[in-house]
Image (cartoon, rainbow, N blue to C red):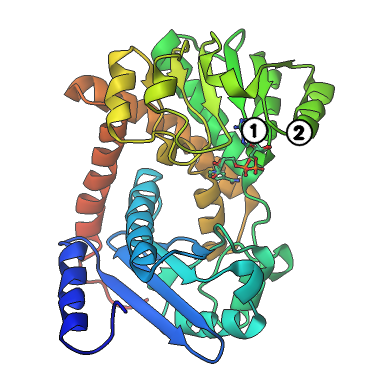
Amino acid sequence: MLYSPGSAGLERVVGVFSELGNEYEEVVFFHDPPSGLRAIVAIHSTALGPALGGTRFYPFDSEEDALVDVLRLARGMTYKAAAGGLDLGGGKAVIIGDPQRDKSEELLRAYGRFIDSLGGRYVTAEDVGTSRPDMDVLRRETRWVTGVSKRLGGSGDPSPVTAYGVFQGLRACVEEALRASSLEGVRVVVQGAGKVGAALIRHLVEAGGVVSVADVDVDAVAHVVAEHGVETVDPAKAHAVECDVFAPCALGAVIRDDTLAELKCRVVAGAANNQLQRPEHAQALQEMGILYAPDFVINAGGLINVADELGGYDRERAMAKVEGIYRTLRDVFRRARLEGITPSRAAERLAEDRIATVGRVRLLWVPPR
Ligand code: NAD
């Protein structure tokens, strides 16, 4: 037991504080034995605003695994929100359990009440193992939840907005790497024709891109081929196709030691989370002369969309904010060039600068409104 009282337990608690370093503001453990709820909320930073991040419902092998995951994911959300220009901090939550077996109204409502007790310092959303109907249940106990149904003021499926953001980001990528002012004639391989990939393909085709698609799901491929007449490629070798842009829109860790050597593209830019298996792969791409659009910048459309719910959702306003991904990526690439660093590091520095500067301004006292 990680937190059992007694000397052994206390040692572990000391271990947790050192694990948090100087970074995390607050880590809360929620426990409601009758419903079986065991949840951890990690608030990494509220320097820019409330910590927004989804709730992952997952059968972790151990409580330690759950803690490590929630800490890592919360930190990532701080960087994503800051680089996305949002007035939001970073946080994340995990519920330990099997969503198929353990999810119940009682458990979700207990969780909702706990979220409410944080008074808006943490705002939740859906993630792996949770869905929109779950968010609707949480809403009955707290207003600090996004991604609810439209009838409750929600923003609906974020995927088209994410795809639009990726498309805007691709414009910045081809400008930087190909010196092209549009996507006309640009050869793009889209890996994954799911909710984001299919919507991205539509934007690319409309912009005159030459698109190929790879998906392990034959129906998903058939759908986009019928709609847009695009070429198909073998999903096992999508990364190895000669093209201008390889757009991962399926799984994470597609850029790794074995795939790197086979890449024949000039840009890697897509919606998938955690595209690099290890951070060093950013440097490896740079050395190969391949431009990489940091995933947490180019795929921030979904977050930008859901964050808009906090001000009363307006799709047009959300789309306009998502267009900013183009400019953000241009700034990232420029900084990377000037400072001789990878775009991933440049994006982190951009986020860190915003947290330091805007975060400081937000410490100034103003009378309550
Ligand atoms: P999705 O499940 O709708 O689509 C994923 C597609 O990838 C599916 O069609 C699946 O068959 C395909 N696929 C799986 N394995 C594959 C493989 N080996 N090769 C080729 N295709 C494969 O998911 P989505 O919502 O479109 O999200 C795609 C990616 O973008 C995910 O990594 C997700 O985390 C990330 N993302 C999505 C959003 C969003 O708004 N939906 C936001 C940010 C990031």
Indicate yes or no: mark 1 CB to ligand 1 under 8 Å.
yes
Q: Is residue 207 visible?
A: no
Rendered view: 278 above or below 35: above
| Frontmost residue, 232 versus 1 | 1
Residue at the image point whose x is 42% and y is 41% from the top: 296
13 relative to 325 in the view: left or right: left
Residue 148, image quadrant? bottom right
Gap between marks 1 and 2 measured at Cα: 10 Å
Considering only order in the chain, which callout, 2 or 1, is on the residue closer to the N terminus? 1
Q: Which mark is residue 220?
A: 2
Picture coordinates of residue 281 (x, y %)? 32, 28
287 relative to 37 in the view: left or right: left
The amino acid marked with disc number 1 is Gly
The amino acid marked with disc number 2 is Ala
53 relative to 157 in the view: left or right: left
Image quadrant holding the C terminus, namely bottom left
Q: Are marks 1 and 2 in contact (CB under 8 Å)?
A: yes
Q: Secondary structure at mark 2?
A: helix
Indicate yes or no: mark 2 CB to ligand 1 under 8 Å.
yes
Rendered view: 186 above or below 268: above
Instruction: Tell me which image quadrant ligand 1 sits in.
Output: top right
Picture coordinates of residue 254 (x, y %)? 47, 30
Residue at the image point whose x is 52% and y is 64% from the top: 58
Badge 1: residue crowd in 10 Å (few <14, some 14–19, many ≥20):
many
Picture coordinates of residue 319 (x, y %)? 59, 43
Image quadrant holding the N terminus, namely bottom left
Picture coordinates of residue 256 (x, y %)? 39, 28
Q: Which mark is residue 210?
A: none
- The residue labelled by disc 1 is 197
Q: Secondary structure at mark 1?
A: helix
Residue 131, image quadrant? bottom right
